[in-house]
C-alpha cells in the first residue's frame, strides 16, 4: 500500500542523521524536561514514528541490521567481530543501493560501527563514493581527558569539559558537524551535479559524557529525578539483567565500589548520570540544528529528505539497569522521523524561505514544537532501507525469501510508505517488532553485556506489539547460529496497558506446556491477567515464524 505522494514529490537528495545511544528522550516524544528545540523543529515538519524499535540494543549489530535491512540472525553479527560480507552474505547496504542508482554517497562520523564489523573501512568503497570522514579528536574519547577535583586527568563516565582545554580545542561531534556543513555548502554550490546521499553519525549521547560543560547548566541537579522504577523487578529472570559493565569500567564509577551485578549505584550519582545524559542530548540537538541550518543556507531543504534516528536506546536506571544491552523498551526503542518535502511539509517554492532556523537552546525564549504527522504503528529499524528508497523515488527492495544468505538485495523489513500522507495513524494490531539479545549464561557474568559469539549460550528473542512485550530466553548454538525453541531458559510477558514500564513479569513457568511455551490466546491471557486481551496470533507461533524466517 505505497503512498502516491512519493511519485508526485520525490525528494532529490537524502540527509541521513544518526545518533548514538539516543532513546526517545526528546521534546517531540513527550519528555517534559529535555531541551531539544532543533530536533523538535525537524519533527514538526516530519512524519514521526512513536513506536520504532532496534533489532539488537548494541551499536554494531543494530547499525548493520538497519543499513542492510537484515536481522542479526541473517547478518550473523551479535558482537563487533565479524563482517557480514565475509561471514554471512554479500548484502547490499542502503547507501550502496543509492550509489548504484547514481547518487554520490558520503559518510561523516559514526554511521557503520567502525572496526571489523565494517571491514575497518566503514564498508568503503562498496557503500561510499568517497572515503568516510572520522573526526580526528575521537582518538581521545577513551583516554584520560576528564579533569578531577585535584586537577588530574581521569577516564571518567561523567566528563563535562572546557572545550578550549581539549586537544585541538574541539570535540568529535563539533568536528563532524563542521565537516557535514562544509559538504552541504559545497553540494549547494555545485547545483545540478546529481543527487547525493549524505549520512552523518554523531557520537553522543554515547558514553563517556565528554561534552561542553555549559550544557549541564540546562539541567540543575535539584530539577533531576530518579528513574520511576529504579529497583530490579522481583520477577525479572537473572538472564535478562544487564550488569552495565561499560559503566563499571569508568574510573568515577569504579570509585563507588558498587557490588556486582545489581549494585545499586548511589542515588546522588544516579542523578548526576541522568543530568549528564540529558545535557549530552541537548549538545547533540545543537549539532543537528547546525546541519539543518546549513541545509537551508545551501537552498537544499526543499528537495532533500531528512531521516533522523538512533541505533538503540539507553537505560537511565529503569529496572536497576544502565546503558543498553537488554530487550526492554528503554534499550530498544528509538526515535525515527522522516522529513519529506512535498509530503510531510510543503515548502513555498515560489517564495523560498527558511525552513529550519537554528534555535539556540540557551536562548531565553521557550521553543516547543509538536510532532507533525504521527504514526503509532510498531515499526523497526529494518524498515528504514525500503522506506527511504521508496520515498526518494527508487524501487524499494523486494522482500527476502525464507533463506536469503545468497540474496544480495532484499529486505527483511517493511516499506512504510503507505503510512505517509495522513495527519495521524492509530495503533495497528497486526504490527510486531522483533528484537534479540545474547547472553553467555543464565546468571549475570562480567561478559553478559557483550559476549563474544563463541560464548553465546542463550538468546533472548523478544516480540513487541502495541499492547505487550513477550520475551523467551532460548538455548543458542553459536556454531550453527540456531536457537532451540524447546530449550526455554526463562520468559517475560508484560502487558503494556497496565504495566507500561515493564516491571511486572506475567510469564508463568508452571503454565508452560512442555516442551514448548504456552500459546497466549484470549483464554490464556484471561487466566494470567484476569481479563481478556486481544492478541494477533499465539505468541509462540509468532516466535516460531520469526525464527524460521517467515516473518
Image: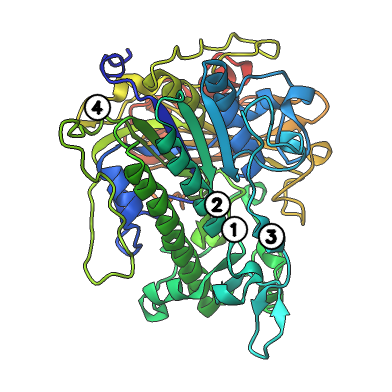
Which residue is at the front of the view, 534 or 438?
438
In this rendering, is residue 88 above or below 244? Answer: above
Q: Mark 2 points at which residue?
A: 176
Q: Which of marks 4 and 1 is nearer the N terminus?
A: 1
Q: How far apart are marks 3 and 4 (CA)?
A: 44 Å
| Contact check, label 2 and label 3, Cβ < 8 Å | no
Spatial CA span between label 2 and label 3: 25 Å
Question: From the viewer's perspective, is residue 285 above or below residue 271?
Answer: above
In the image, 287 versus 415, the foreground residue is 287
Residue under the point 64% across and 64% down:
262
Residue 450 % position (x, y): 72, 48
- Classify the position of the N terminus by image quarter: top left
- Cα distance between the residues tagged 1 and 2: 6 Å
For marks 2 and 4, the one nearer the N-term is 2
Tell me the crowding category of disc 4: few under 14, some 14 to 19, or many 20 or more residues within 10 angstroms, Cα based: some
User: Residue beneath label 3, please?
Assistant: 246
Residue 472: in sight, yes or no?
no
Amino acid at each position: 500500500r505505497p503512498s502516491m505522494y512519493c511519485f508526485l514529490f520525490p525528494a532529490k537528495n537524502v540527509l541521513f542523521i544518526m545518533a548514538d545511544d539516543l532513546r526517545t528522550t526528546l521534546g517531540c516524544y513527550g519528555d517534559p524536561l529535555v531541551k531539544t528545540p532543533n530536533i523538535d523543529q525537524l519533527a514538526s515538519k516530519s512524519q514521526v514514528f512513536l513506536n520504532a524499535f532496534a533489532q539488537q540494543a548494541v551499536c554494531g549489530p543494530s547499525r548493520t541490521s538497519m543499513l542492510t535491512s537484515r536481522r542479526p540472525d541473517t547478518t550473523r553479527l551479535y558482537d563487533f567481530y565479524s563482517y557480514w560480507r565475509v561471514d554471512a552474505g554479500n548484502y547490499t547496504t542502503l547507501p550502496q543501493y543509492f550509489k548504484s542508482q547514481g547518487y554520490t554517497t558520503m559518510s561523516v562520523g559514526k554511521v557503520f560501527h567502525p572496526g571489523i564489523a565494517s571491514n575497518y573501512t566503514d564498508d568503503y568503497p562498496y557503500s561510499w563514493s568517497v572515503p568516510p570522514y572520522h573526526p580526528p579528536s575521537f582518538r581521545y574519547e577513551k583516554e584520560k581527558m576528564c579533569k578531577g577535583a585535584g586537577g588530574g586527568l581521569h577516564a571518567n563516565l561523567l566528563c563535562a569539559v572546557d572545550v578550549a582545554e581539549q586537544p585541538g580545542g574541539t570535540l568529535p561531534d563539533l568536528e563532524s558537524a563542521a565537516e557535514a556543513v562544509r559538504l552541504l555548502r559545497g553540494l549547494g554550490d555545485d547545483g545540478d551535479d546529481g543527487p547525493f546521499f549524505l549520512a552523518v553519525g554523531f557520537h553522543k549521547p554515547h558514553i563517556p559524557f565528554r561534552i561542553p560543560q555549559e550544557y549541564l547548566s540546562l539541567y540543575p541537579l535539584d530539577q533531576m529525578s530518579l528513574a520511576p522504577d529504579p529497583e530490579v523487578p522481583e520477577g525479572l529472570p537473572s538472564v535478562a539483567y544487564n550488569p552495565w559493565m561499560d559503566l563499571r569500567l569508568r574510573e568515577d564509577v569504579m570509585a563507588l565500589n558498587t557490588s556486582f551485578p545489581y549494585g545499586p549505584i548511589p542515588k546522588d550519582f544516579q542523578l548526576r548520570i541522568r543530568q549528564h545524559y540529558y545535557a549530552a542530548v541537548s549538545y547533540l540537538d545543537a549539532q543537528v540544528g547546525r546541519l539543518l541550518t546549513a541545509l537551508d543556507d545551501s537552498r537544499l531543504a526543499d528537495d532533500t529528505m531528512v531521516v533522523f534516528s538512533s541505533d538503540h536506546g539507553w537505560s537511565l536506571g529503569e529496572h536497576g539497569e544502565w546503558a543498553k544491552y537488554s530487550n526492554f523498551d528503554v534499550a530498544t526503542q528509538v526515535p525515527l522521523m522522516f522529513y519529506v518535502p512535498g509530503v510531510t511539509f510543503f515548502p513555498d517554492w515560489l517564495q523560498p524561505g527558511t525552513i529550519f532556523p537554528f534555535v539556540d537552546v540557551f536562548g531565553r525564549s521557550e521553543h516547543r514544537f509538536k510532532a507533525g504527522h504521527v504514526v503509532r504503528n510498531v515499526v523497526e529499524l529494518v524498515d528504514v532501507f525500503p522506506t527511504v528508497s521508496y520515498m526518494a523515488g527508487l524501487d524499494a527492495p523486494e522482500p527476502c525469501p525464507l533463506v536469503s544468505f545468497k540474496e544480495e538485495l532484499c529486505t527483511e523489513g517493511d516499506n512504510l510508505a503507505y503510512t505517509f500522507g495522513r495527519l495521524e495513524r492509530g495503533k495497528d494490531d497486526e504490527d510486531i517488532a522483533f528484537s534479540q539479545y545474547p547472553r553467555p549464561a543464565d546468571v549475570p557474568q562480567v561478559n553478559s553485556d557483550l559476549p563474544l559469539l563463541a560464548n553465546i549460550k542463550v538468546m533472548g528473542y523478544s516480540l513487541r506489539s502495541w499492547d505487550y512485550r513477550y520475551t523467551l530466553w532460548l538455548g543458542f548454538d553459536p556454531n550453527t547460529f540456531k536457537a532451540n525453541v524447546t530449550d526455554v531458559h526463562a520468559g517475560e510477558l508484560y502487558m503494556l496497558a497496565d504495566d507500561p514500564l515493564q516491571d511486572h513479569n506475567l510469564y508463568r513457568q508452571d503454565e508452560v506446556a512442555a516442551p514448548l511455551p504456552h500459546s497466549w490466546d484470549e483464554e490464556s491471557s484471561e487466566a494470567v491477567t484476569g481479563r481478556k486481551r486481544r492478541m494477533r496470533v499465539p505468541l509462540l507461533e509468532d516466535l516460531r515464524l520469526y525464527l524460521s524466517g517467515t516473518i
